[in-house]
Image: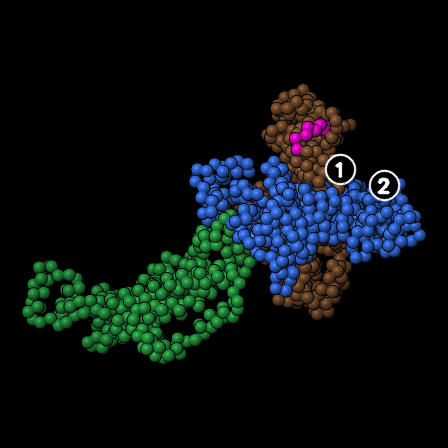
Amino acid sequence: MSYLELQNVTKEFPGVIALNDVTFDVQDGEFFVLLGPTGAGKTTTLRIVAGLIKQNEGSVLFDDHPVDDFPPAERDVALVFQQYSLYPTMSVYDNLAFPLRSPMRKLPEDQIRTKVEGTAKTLRIEHLMDRKTANLSGGEMQRVSIGRAIVRDTRIFLMDEPLSNLDFKLREALRVELQHLQKTQGSTTLFVTHDQIEALTMADRIAVLNRGRIIQIGTPEDIYDRPATTFVAQLVGSPRINLVKSQREDGSLLIENSDLHLPMPPDCEVPQEVLLGIRPEDVDIVPEGEFSGQVALTEPLGVETVVHIRSQDQTLVSLMPGLMDFRTGDEIKFNILHDRLHCFDLDGKRVQIK
Amino acid sequence: MFLFLGNYSKESYTLAEKYMATIELQQVEKKFGELHAVKPMDLTINDGEFVVLLGPSGCGKTTTLRMISGLETVTSGTILLGDRNVTWLHPSERDVAFVFQFYALYPHISARENISFPLRAQRESKEVIDQRVKEVAALLRIEHLLNQRPGNLSGGDQQRVALARALVRRPEAFLMDEPLGALDADFRESMRAEIKQLHIDQHATTVYVTHDQIEAMAMGDRIVVMSEAEIQQAGSPIDIYFDPANLFVAKFIGSPGMNLVSADYTQGVVSIPGTENRYPIPDGWRSPIDESVGGEGKIVLGFRPESAQLMAEGPLSGEVYASELQGAYSVLHVNVNTDDIVHIRTDRKIDYPIGTIVHFDINPQMVRFFNPETEAGIKKEVSQ
Amino acid sequence: MATFNEVGPGKPVTESARVDKLTPKSRITHNLRAIIVIVIAIVILVPIFVMLNTAFKTRPEVVSVPPKVIYTPTLEGFVLLLTERAIASPAVLEELQAAAQAGELGLFDRLALKSGQEITGSSEYVTRLRNSVIIAGLSTIASVVLAVFAGYAFSRYTVIGKNDLLFFILSTRFLPAVVVTVPLFLMYTQLNLHDTHIGMILLYTVFNLSLAVWLMKGFMDEIPLEYEEAALVDGYTRLQAFYKIVLPQAVTGIAATTVFCLIFAWNEYAFALMLTSETARTAPPSIATMMGRGGIEWTAIAVGSLGFLIPVVVVVFLLRNYLLRGVTFGAVRK
């Protein structure tokens, strides 16, 4: 039985269709990520689930019960915003207690205190209780926001890019914590982001959203290994996937603007012109490689090196582990791993290579 | 004399010709009241070098950049640009171009007018202006956008226009303040490569500020890691990555950063308190460690996520805390004792549920040690 | 000789400053500007100073030529303004003089005695001032309260024809007040609102509402929506979220709006003159025309102006920080 379900949700704003027939479900205890670029409709989706805006068509169900007519207060969801979520006129303790003090709940103060202190302990913010929220660092503020969501013990957590405004290192640390927290508490979470690393590392399942439409739903492996369209393929993976136009030419695929031929099995069904997707980690620079090119640029990242390879007029990006001692202009040889190629037709849809 | 008058109208400009554009900071310091924003700092940026000032928010990197540009005064110290002492020169007299995080493009005029603005301010002739704008637009591939207003352009394009505006002046140095911070992740990646390519072609002295260590590693000729108002380490990306000078640099560089485990050291063996984990010290480390921490005592064991190898039986073990699929590989977060979590880079097909006990070993070439009191890195004995 | 370019300013700079703001030349221009501003301020304050002096002089001292700068202050003007006097009959005069000698007479009585008068009660100025306080105060409260709710509604809700409505509200300020005084006069007479407190309060409230609504809408716009949404999701109703979250953050905006409305209502002259006569007349119309026995009573007018000035100055001084924010809030867009 699914905990949260959206069925054919459509939302229009004057002049733009924000969400177009969006359908997906989130299982009980699942960490579900909505991934998409800015403007895709992710925040709109979240606000519809929370009840802050009303959809034009379709319905939202919690545990198979439609909640479309319920105001936000009655839906019992917790929402963590990107910013501006902590009430600036109150201390951290009051911020955490605020949801519990709502007239709807009528909880006695000592119960509120127990809950608040428990939450603070989980998030390791006990030492900040009396501070005014303006005196907190970015990471501490976000912890308090998450705390305010957790303290209510709701059935669904909605998170709107909560890590986007944090420093790189803070984001890393909070990512791991959030994931661990979600797994140990078993809370159903709908998490929205444009950062593909967040999606890949934290999600049980991902839904890719673009311009109001769901493009693909699947586990992180599905999304990464079997992207349904070029859009999805380019969205996940860092560095970005190489996408090159190629033509079929007697038993091989010729990459446009280069002299790279990729052998194809004779009975394979692939259209005349395809967009070939090659992940940078599948371009292997080895002395005995079958293809040759020049080094256009290297980006040494320590743990790995990004090498931009030029072959005639085509550029391919390769990701090699460890250090690579190349200079711009060096002639190199490389392989492209055949069994990891992605084929897309010219419209961007995935084509299976039989 | 020529430089002082700010006469920049050379007839034919080949971007390979530059003035001597070394930037030198001598004991440059900045205080805000009692707060030390930048402690006295010495730094030399060589002609044509791409130097990255890297650090977390509040470390002083942006303040340093602003002092070089003149948007901020120094409390004490000297700034030299080429052979000129520019410490107290008007920002416009220093001949540096500043690229901001939020583009700072004039919204009411077209891209072309934005780009030519600095030249018109210097009262260049119309032919020179048109010529240079064309050159720079071709370089950054924005010719088709020249007549648009900034409001109609995407973030990446706006940043390109901002870069063009800086380039068109042909200053002695470029100063960039987190220029990619406001862009989406995919734009950031492509702009990163573009800026690096641009630097390889133009070879202009550049000082680049960022908190993103991947950007720093990818683009910098040299990285200056800053924290709490001082320089923690300055060196090439490889030096910073493989030989961090202290705990901060070790942790900050790398995604995730270096694993740093507090341990006890006795007789050539490192043991992690509270567990059975024992790691024998590889060759070449014994004497430096003895020298630094004495024959016995506390030490910090450091190793990067990719230098740890999972195996069925190994000297070190722990319990899985979380596992992250990061695309081409996975990162396993392992509790080696109640306080320390280490990150191990693994093949992506491997998935360990929370609570599994795993064993691993560390590549002896890549292990590092730190003195827990001074936080400094211990240098390995150089073999003869 | 070392120039600024070579050695910099004398002492270390420990605040945030751009280099070009510290050069000797820019220092000079900065100081020059400050001096000009001070001079202009002095010029503007001179009439106030004169008024202060006039309030404490005696009648002959006021009109003397050349004007007296050194004088002994006296409270004669206060007496003239604040009390009703009548020429005392000889019997009463004797009584008062005896009391004065015995030291039992109050200050005002003694002053009145000097010109052979006795005090018969407080003058209508006191009533006028009280009217001003009541009318301006209540109308300010009314317009601010209404504006807070209206501003919130305009800011948060989709109102049909919102932009048109807002423009319409703004357009009421295009009119000079005098243009509508005659129709208003007729209306008020018909409604029996002429010369009533409630009539004036209503009028000032309505006139202030346009500015107040615009100001409050602006302030409400600045408060991010996310705070209320978080409260809604947490289980509060809209109204509760409004009281607990929005209002505390709107306090500075409310203070700024209050000051603006108060200043307008307090100083309002045209309507006060046309639409009131005895009962509800406020201070402004009466001060300028205070006639005494021998013509225009300068000292009384000065004291009256002073008394009229002080309450507003005190209020604005107490709220000065909010006022500054109110003036600049729209100037810098995020």
Q: Amino acid at mark 1?
A: Lys
How many badges with numbers are in the image? 2
Residue at (54%, 41%) from the top-left corner?
A153
* Quarter holding residue C123: bottom left
**Main secondary structure of the magenta stretch:** strand
Q: Secondary structure at mark 2?
A: loop
At which x and y percent is residue A306? 77, 45
Mark 2 vs 1: CB contact within 8 A:
no
| Residue at which label 1 appears | B349
Q: Amino acid at mark 2?
A: Val
Residue at the extreme top of the image, as rendered:
B267
At which x and y percent is residue A169? 63, 42
At which x and y percent is residue C259? 39, 62
Residue at (22%, 77%) from the top-left corner?
C295
Horizontal relation, residue C215 to residue B39: left or right? left
Horizontal relation, residue A254 to residue B363: left or right? right
Q: Which chain is green?
A: C
Q: Give me the chain letter of mark 1.
A: B
- Extent of the magenta region: B354-363
Q: Which chain is brown?
A: B
Instruction: Determine the CA span between mark 2 and mark 1.
Output: 24 Å
At which x and y percent is residue B323? 68, 37
* Quarter holding residue B13: bottom right
Q: Secondary structure at mark 1?
A: loop
Residue at (31%, 63%) from the top-left corner?
C310
Horizontal relation, residue C126 to residue B329: left or right? left
| Residue at which label 2 appears | A286
Colour assignment, chain A: blue
Residue at (73%, 69%) from the top-left corner?
B127
